[in-house]
Image: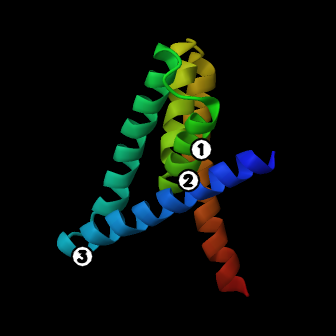
Amino acid sequence: MLKSILIVGFGGFIGTVARFMISRYFQFNLASVFPWGTFIVNIVGCLLIGIIYGLSEKGDFLSPEVRLFLTVGICGGFTTFSTFSNDAFLLLRQEEWLRFAFYTSLSFFLGLLAVFAGRIILKLF
């Protein structure tokens, strides 16, 4: 278990730093109200996790440790949106239409509500 924690932690460090650098780059180089940095990071993260899991399904290209490092570590540190999107994709692939709709809509709306609630709570104290 310690080995897995270290693998994920090191990958998370790399992914987090990459997210910070890429987001900052777009934030400073594109004058826009639209959050381009976050948007680009989320889409790139989804592409990366799709490629990694696609390679995993094609054969023994990636050991379980490398897959853990790349997906949970780097992609997880880079953006949890990629994991969310992959989970949603798996539900679609399994033709779990109701679970897909429930998972995606509930994740989005409760996530938005939680951000709002967090801000309200801070205003109260």
Question: Farthest residue toward the right?
Answer: 1
Up/down of 4 relative to 78, above or below: above
The front one of 82 and 14 is: 14
Q: Amino acid type of disc 1?
A: Val
Mark 2 or mark 3: which comes first in sequence?
2
Distance CA(mark 2)–CA(mark 1)? 8 Å
Mark 1 or mark 3: which comes first in sequence?
3
Q: Position of residue 23 (x, y in %)?
A: 35, 65
Label pair 2/1, CB-CB below 8 angstroms: yes
Specify the quadrant that holds the N terminus.
Answer: top right
Question: On the image, numbered disc 3 is attached to which residue?
Answer: 28
Residue in the picture at 40% in, 39% down: 48
Distance CA(mark 2)–CA(mark 3)? 26 Å
Q: Amino acid type of disc 2?
A: Gly
Specify the quadrant that holds the C terminus.
Answer: bottom right
Q: Is residue 80 visible?
A: no
Residue in the picture at 28% in, 60% down: 36
Query: Circle 2 — which element?
Result: helix
Left or right: 85 as drawn, with respect to 121: left
Viewer-nearest of labels 1 and 3?
Answer: 1
- Marking on residue 72: 1
The front one of 1 and 47 is: 1
Q: Position of residue 73 (x, y in %)?
A: 58, 49
Viewer-nearest of labels 2 and 3?
Answer: 2
Question: On the image, numbered disc 2 is attached to which residue?
Answer: 11
Callout 2 environment at 10 Å: few (<14), some (14 to 19), or many (20+)? many
Q: Residue 26's quadrant in the figure?
A: bottom left
Residue in the picture at 42% in, 61% down: 19
Question: Farthest residue toward the bottom?
Answer: 125
The front one of 112 and 96 is: 96
Q: Amino acid type of disc 3?
A: Phe
